[in-house]
Amino acid sequence: MAKLIIKDLHAEVDGKEILKGIDLTIDQKETVAFLGPNGHGKSTLLNIIIGHPRYHVTKGSIFLDDLNVLEMSVDQRSKAGLFLGMQNPVEIPGVINSDFLRASVNAHGKKPISTYNFYKILDTSTKELKMPFDLATRSLNEGFSGGEKKRNEILQLLMLQPKIALLDEIDSGLDVDAMQTVADVIKKEQEKGMGFLIISHYARLFELIQPTRAIVMINGKIVIDGDPSYIKRIDQTGYEFIKTEFGIEIDKDEIDMNKVSLGECGIKEIIR
Amino acid sequence: MKKEFLLHESELKESEIFTISLNENEKVQITTNSNDTKCIFVSDFSNGSILNIDLKENSKMQLSFLAKRNFDKAEINVNLEKGAHFTAYFADFSKDKEKLKVAINLNGEDSAAHWHLASLSANNDNKEFNININHIAFQTTAISDNYGVCKDQSKLVFSGCSAIYKGSHGSHTRQNSKIMVFDENCDAIARPLLKIDEKDIEASHGAVVGRIPEEHLFYLTSRGLDESEAKRLITYGYLKPITRGFFDESVREEIVSLIERRM
């Protein structure tokens, strides 16, 4: 069973320190509910584990068993068994979903998958997620609804079979039925031994998948690492008890004023 | 706004499909009859070639080009009468210096045109595509979609004007120009231009020149693709959609193989 071990992790984005010393261990068989107010570093941690280039680790370590994750490229981390189900999956025009899925499956395997086997797995997985098969033949996430994008993330999880899956607000944009479908898939994968670290602001998903543990991040630190009862408590009372019981002042999320407030003629965009 | 003027399969079956090639400095005139549907594949387009097309009332034409040879100082001029529809697909895999000038004149009411271009520029290529669309009658519609990939020390320019003249009320026009830049020394320019001389119209343009977005690369690599495979997939996705406009399977396969080889 794989183990993800994070020690004294500090990280910054654009010169601002977001993570201020994270210690966390996740076993492959665990399902960890990851809670905390917006803007306190939850998504940052998930992105750093998978290797997003925007974030810079200034101190600390991440290991997947004996593999030094911080020394690995993004694709190597995926092949080692880490997966990030993204909060806002990007739309990539022209890249056909099934071409991309097949290339990903091939990247994970020792030899290329046959066309027959690939479509068999794709067919089974799309049926499990109650997704229309034609989503696989369209451009990657382009024109997908919010719910379709999230199901497409879970489709990739099913096809790549990671050891530990990090899911960032995978339930946002899902209607009640779709959430049940996604929860059923997660439960099935839990039984097969996949580990999960799941960010969500709603107790509904957690009620359906029954996490084994809950952690709470405040001000870039994990302040609670305990049993799942915290999920219900936070859902009912919010995060105020952290101030009264733990003496931690919760930093407010700063919202910058938009730099551009007037509309522009047409679109002129420079990609960095 | 209607986005796609691709002929339906039934129309393709019923239409007259033929292949033409234009030699150097050759001038070809094609005129449809009213209510005609024509599909034309231009297998060769050369330096100084001039293709003039007149679409009579309510006729439809789908024109596809596969450019492998040089077509410097070449021209395509299209005139549409009332209710005529014109769709063009230009797949450019030529080498060296090219300058193509296109003029699409929507002379008749309710006429519509959709121009698609995919161009790959590499090594020391120097290419300019000047696409001009003139809305001369009312309720006319046009879309100009231009996609390019610019590599090495090459130069790629997308220019041209979409003009809505007086009397063309109720018209819609859209220009899209996107160039993906691969190397520091290449030069890519997307220069959209709208000229509007009428009210009650819809006009827009979008121009994007830049490297592969970091977020796209991150997304694909986070699923196990290495960076070169991710770039290949994105570039392929940029150019491959042009194959939709070619009705012969072997030509579609040739385009895919040209993309693979030249990337």
Image (cartoon, rainbow, N blue to C red):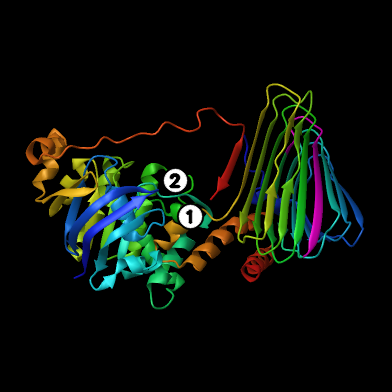
**Magenta span covers which residues?**
B96-112
Q: Residue at x 38, y 48 (%)?
A: A15
Other-residue count near label 2 (Cα within 10 Å), few / some / many at <14 / 14–19 / ≥20: some
Give the percent coordinates (x, y) of residue A143: 48, 44
Residue B107 magenta: yes
Q: Is residue A173 above or below residue A165?
A: above
Q: Residue at x 31, y 67 (%)?
A: A69
In-image side of B89 versus A167 (left or right): right
Give the percent coordinates (x, y) of residue A113: 42, 73
- Checking the image for residue A245, the label placed there is none
Q: Quarter of the image containing the N terminus of chain B?
A: top right
Say which residue label 1 marks: B214
> What type is the residue that disc 1 sits on?
Glu
Q: Residue at x 82, y 33 (%)?
A: B107
Q: Are marks 2 and 1 on the same chain?
A: no
Q: Which chain letter goes with mark 2?
A: A
CB-based contact (under 8 Å), mark 2 and mark 1 = no
Give the percent coordinates (x, y) of residue A114: 44, 74
Q: Can I make out residue A131 in this image?
A: yes
